[in-house]
Each structure stands twice: as structure tokens, then as C-alpha cells.
Image: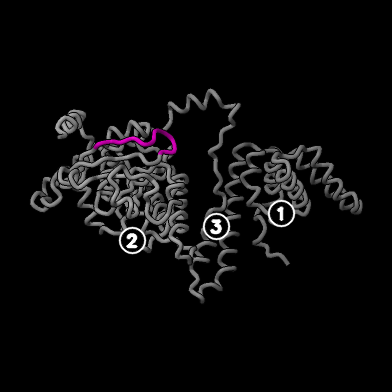
Amino acid sequence: MEKTDEKFAFNEGVERKLLKAIIVNRKFLASIVDLVKSEYFVNEVARDIYKITKAHFIKYKDSIDINVLYNEVKNIYSEKNVEVQNVYRKYFAGLIKEDVRSSDAEYLYDQCLSFCKRQAYKSAFLNNVKYIDNNDFSTIDSAFKKASLIGCYSENEIDYFKEVKSRIIGEKNDIIPIQTGIVGLDKIVYGGWNYKTHPLILFMAPSGVGKSIALCYTGSFALKQNKVVFHYTFELSPSMTAARYDAAITSININERHDQIDEVEKRIGVLKNTNKNSELFIKEYSTGTCTSNMIRADIEKKIGLGFKPDLVIIDYLDIMRFETSKSDDSYFTQQKISEELRAIGQDYHVCVISATQTNREGVSSTTEIESDKVADSYGKIKTSDLIISINQTKAELLQNKARLYIAKNRTGLNKKIIPITIKYDIMTLRDRSNAEIVDEILNVE
């Protein structure tokens, strides 16, 4: 016997209106076809009509013609007694007369989605409570994650032949990129960070060259453009990370901030006053404990508080945990982590910027570090949209110089070198001027 709470809590009229919206509105049908089960309908005739409509859509990828639908319904009731046949005819006649406005469709979708989510969460709870005793929390997390994704379908679709003009005009009116703070890099990535072209970006370098500095500088420069930044750190403490932001924002030596506290506060205040919407949240997770779901949950929490990120910075990918794997295969786990981080960028319309280590060959490389010098897993290279290696010889280190190298660019120029200066005292990266580079060339003995 079915429970009453496993059916729509609509009266017959609203349920019929929902069914009509499903039949005549292809977009509506496409958005709910994976959510709604026929048994959710209270009325038996509605259940049969929905089954036919859904089967037709799955097979032909289109709405069913009302006359074709009626023929299919007749095939069902023709073998029943006259009284039941009249019930089917009367219901179908009322269905044809039903008028569904666009506002009605939106309301019905919201109500339908809420019901389906409730059912999914109830199922996740009832079917997975047994795993608690075995401490199998990853299975439970996966079940609830799947329930949370109910109704998450992509609206990012182009009807190529119908939208030529609007599509090309829209490119000019698209989002404004977030400048990187390095002019040479901006030129290569079409003006700056943009989630549509580069949802996942990785800085790649040996240990100690400046990956974390690059991440903090990236965040600080975004703050100067009125942006909201979420910074997740797994090695540096939040206070140490904040200190790096202090230096990058104020241009005060990181080791001299305690002697200039008032000036630090003043300069940070000036930035905030001129960039009212800028926000920075720095959150720490212990090394090897943070999963992409934890990042996603924290983003959801902050969005609920009114803070939507423009940049998500993760320091760094290699020391995250992939929660559903019991494998020690770092290639597999790091590729999966990178896929999940990229999905966060796509889902929340935000650039996710992280870092990764090079392997031993990359550490000893005397030329620009290519993507094949990544440590542990080439899978994260395949997933990432932009890979920027930071290259530095011992001589360059002594001179606070380095070279950015575009090791991979999914949408744009590759294999380009950008000479930079790294100011370790104020945690900034700057383009080196053409004059500096010419002088170096002329002074080579």
C-alpha cells in the first residue's frame, strides 16, 4: 500500500494543470522528466498519461502531439468497461481545456521540485542509515549529495542556427574579466580571469618558488576590483595567509607590519572604502582532510549569508582528499579532485584558481616547465583549462626575477613566456619592463 506522502499534495485541478504543462511545454518537460515518477500522481488517468508522455519524450526527444497522445490513451482504456472509458474521456477533455500561463508553469515547477527533493532526501536517509554503524560516511555523503543535485540541470545551451546574431552580439556584452595584475598575462587570457574560458586554473612550480605567493597576489588584485574572494588554505595558517594579503594590498614589508599597524589598517581601509563590495574570507582545513564537497558546502553557506564569490582560491589541489575513494592511486584521485573543482567553477560561475607541484624533473629543469613535469597525476593537467608554470633559476632568485610560462591554455595562446619580478617582501608579481629585459640581453657576457 502506497503512503499518501509519496504523492503530490495537489488538488485534482492543480495536478491536471501540472500534467498539461508537462505535455505542451517541451522545456518544462525536459526539466522535470528525470525528477517526476508516474506514481507521484494521485489520479490513475494522470499516471497513465504521464507514462505515455515521458516514454515519448525519452524515445523521440520531443513533446507528444495531443492527437497522438489521445490515440495512446484510447489504447489503454479501450479494453476497460464503459464506466472507466467515460472517466478517461472526461479527464482528457478537461485536460485539453486546461490553460497554463507561464507564471503557472514556474509555480508548478517550483512545487514539483520541492516535492521531488523531499522524496530524494527521505530516500537517502532511509536507505543509508544502516551505514552509520559501519562508519561508512562517504556512502552517506554521496547519497545526500545526489539528493542535493535534484533539479540541477544546465541552462547553458545554444541553438546554433537560430541564435547567430544574438550570440555574436552577446560576446561583446559578456562578463568583464577579473584582471590578473600582470599585464602580459592579461593579454594572453583575453583581459583576465574568466570562468567561461578558464573555470579551473593551476599555477605549477617546484616547492618554494612562489605558488602560494601567486595565489595570494591573485586574490589581493581581485579585491582591488571590487570582487569577493574565498581563499581556502591547507598548509599556511589563516593568519599567515592574511599577512600575505596585508603585504600585497598595502605594499608594506610583510615583516614590518607590526611596526606599522596603523598604516596597514589605514591602507586596507582605503581599499575597502573604494571597493565597497570587496570581501575576503580565509578558511583553513588541515592538510589532506578537505574535499571538494566541503568547499562546495562552505560556498553554499556563504551564498546563504549573501556573499557570492568571484574567485575561489585553493592552496592547494595536491593536498586535498577525494572522499569516495579508498584507493592510493594518486593519478586517479587528483584527476577526480580537479574534475570536481572545475565543476564548482562551472556550477557557481566562478574561476577556481589553485596550484600544483612539479615532479623531480621539473625541479631540476633549466628550461620552461612544461605540463608533463607535473607531480603525481597528469589527469589534473587534462582537466585544467589554464596551466601557468613559474620558472626561476638560482640567479633569478637572487635578483627577485622569474618567468611565467603558459604550459596549457584551452582557449588562447600557448607556450608564451612572461618575464616577471617577484617581490617577496610585499608578496607581489609584476611584469618586467622591456627596458629591463633589453639591458639583460645586452649585458650577457
**Which percent across, then down, holds residue 203?**
33, 46
Q: Amino acid at mark 1?
A: Ser
Q: Which mark is residue 285?
A: 2
- Disc on the earlier residue, 3 or 2: 3
Q: Nearer the viewer, residue 49 or 84?
A: 49
- Residue furthest out toward the bottom: 133
Identified at 48% across, 73% down, the residue is: 135
| Label placed on residue 331 | none
- SS under mark 2: loop
Residue 106 x %, y %: 59, 42
Q: Nearer the viewer, mark 1 or mark 2?
A: 2
Place residue 222 in its image quadrant.
Answer: top left
Amino acid type of the residue tagged 2 in the rendering: Tyr
By secondary structure, the bulk of the magenta-drawn segment is best described as loop
- Residue under label 1: 38
First reached walking from the N terminus: tag 1 or tag 2:
1
Q: Which residue is mark 3?
A: 146
With respect to residue 128, does 265 lie above or below?
above
Q: Residue at x 40, y 48 (%)?
A: 372
Q: Magenta segment range?
A: 409-419
Can residue 112 be seen at all in this image of the molecule? yes
How far, Cα to Cα, is label 3 from label 2?
Answer: 24 Å
